[in-house]
Structures are given as structure tokens and as C-alpha cells.
Image (tube, rainbow, N blue to C red):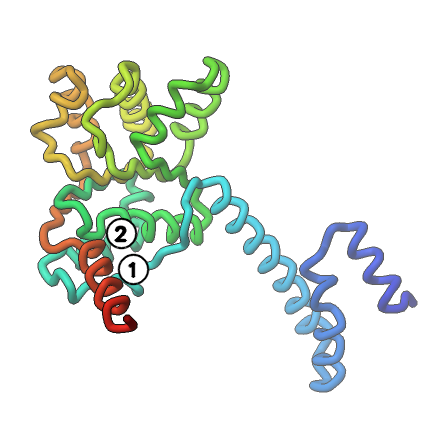
Amino acid sequence: MMTIPEIERCLRQLRLSGVRDTLQTRVLQAQGANQPFLETFSLILQDELDRRQSRLIERRYQQSGLDEKLTLAEFDWAFNPKLPRQTCFQLHTLAFVAAGENAMLVGKPGTGKSHIAKAIAYQAILHSHKVQYLETDDFFHRHALNAPAQREARMRTIIDCDLLVLDDLFLARAIPDEAGAWLQTLIHQRYKLRRSVIVTSNRVVQDWGTYLRDNTMSTTILDRLMHHCHLLEFDGRSYRLKEAAEALARETKSN
């Protein structure tokens, strides 16, 4: 019979780190509770599955482009009570991802569109979906600088993911000349694959043709985005201005 250190070496060779990390704890629990072997073994296997799932989630988060792990629970719904809260929570169930539907969050700056989009994206990662989050205007400019082979590989990753978030679309009025064509390709390819897109924008859809400098292209993009789409309008006061005012008040008080 192998000793615990020998078993741990075997587990390391088999790359069963979840089992190795909890083995001694499980052995002590089993001895103390006089647990049947199969019950103990099932717990040990679950430890390994949990560790692998945790690593998968972290890897997908790192690959997603998200810069923070946000939730809907920490969102201040009371500040703007007219926001489409119920629809946001419906999107958070991820049923729209399973159905290959889209969501467009459009409205005033600072009203929480990006927070909602990021929270839904992180929820999708927790449920083992592949997610790509893009700060859209920044992506357009960086993408333009890449070599053709890099652009093709990047586009394939974005097209193939389960959920794509295009955050702050048309934040800048001027976009690179090729950006409209890239956007049209992304939306068209994902539409054919029935893969979901979340778009947030401060710009009303009627003005998209102006920013793309092509009304036909704008119509084509919107036609595909808005087919099977949840349209959420965000109105109200700016959370960023609220936080800035609170920070200023604290600073003034401390002085």
C-alpha cells in the first residue's frame, strides 16, 4: 500500500491537482466520520472537477478581455429607478445566448450600460461560455495597426465566441476607414452562426449611418443586429457624475 506522499506524487504525475490539494483533508474526514469508501471517493472526484472548472473559468475570463468581474447585485438600481431592470435580469439568465439573440443597450452616458453588459458577460463566463469583450473604438484603432494575419486570427476568435460584447460603439465620432467593413463582417458572420452580440452605445441608431459614413452599411448592420434583439433604453442621471460629486464632497469635508 502506498503512503500519502507516494499517492501525492502519483497524483502530481497524473495532473490531478484538485485531488492532491484536498486528499489529506478528505482522508481525515473519512476517518473521523467512518465514511464509506464510495462516499469519500466521490467527494475526492468532485474536488478535482471543481478545481478544473475553476481554472477553466479563470482562463476564459483572462481570454475574454474583461477588465473587472461585475455583477448585477452590486448595481445601484435605486439611483435611476426607470432603468429596464427586469429586462436586464432576464438577459442575466443567459437564455438569449442559448437562443442566439442579441441585445442593444442604448442611451445617455453614465447610466450603467457598460456595467450591465460586463455583468452579463461575466455571468456567461461563469456558465462556461466563451466571451469576447471589446471596447469598440479602441479595438478599431488597434486592429488597424495589426498585420493581416493577426487581424484574420483575431477576427476568427471574435466571430467564433459564444457571446460578443461591443462596448461604447461610436464613442468617438471618427473611426478608421476600414472599421465599418470589419463591423459589418463581424455582425454578418455572427448572424449566420446565430451567436449573440451585446452592443452598448450612447448614439441613437438613426445616426449610425453618419458615423459609418455609409447609410447602406448601417442599414445592413442594424438589420442583422435587431433581428431577434432585446432593445433596452437607458435614461437618467450619470453614475459617474454622482461618484465624482461624492468624492469631491468627501475631499472638501476632510479639508
Q: Is residue 250 above or below residue 232?
A: below
Classify residue 20 by image quadrant: bottom right
Q: Is residue 211 above or below residue 26?
A: above
Quadrant of the drawing holding the N terminus: bottom right
Task: Name the secondary structure under disc 1.
Answer: loop
Query: How much space separates mark 2 and mark 1, taking CA atoms?
Result: 7 Å
Left/right of residue 122 with respect to residue 253 in the rendered view: right
At x 23%, y 60%, the residue is 243
Q: Position of residue 92 (x, y in %)?
A: 29, 54
Residue furthest to the front in view is 255
Towards the viewer: 114 or 58? 114
The residue carrying pointer 2 sits among few (fewer than 14), some (14 to 19) or many (20 or more) residues within 10 Å by Cα, namely many
Left/right of residue 69 with respect to residue 174 in the rendered view: right
Task: Name the secondary structure under disc 2.
Answer: helix
At x 74%, y 68%, the residue is 23
Q: Position of residue 119 (x, y in %)?
A: 33, 53
Quadrant of the drawing holding the C terminus: bottom left
In the rendered image, which residue does mark 2 sit on? 116
Look at the numbered discs 2 and 1 and tell me whether their residues touch, using CB distance below 8 Å: yes
* Sequence-earlier tag: 2 or 1: 1
Towards the viewer: 251 or 61? 251
Q: Amino acid at mark 1?
A: Leu
In the rendered image, which residue does mark 1 sit on? 72
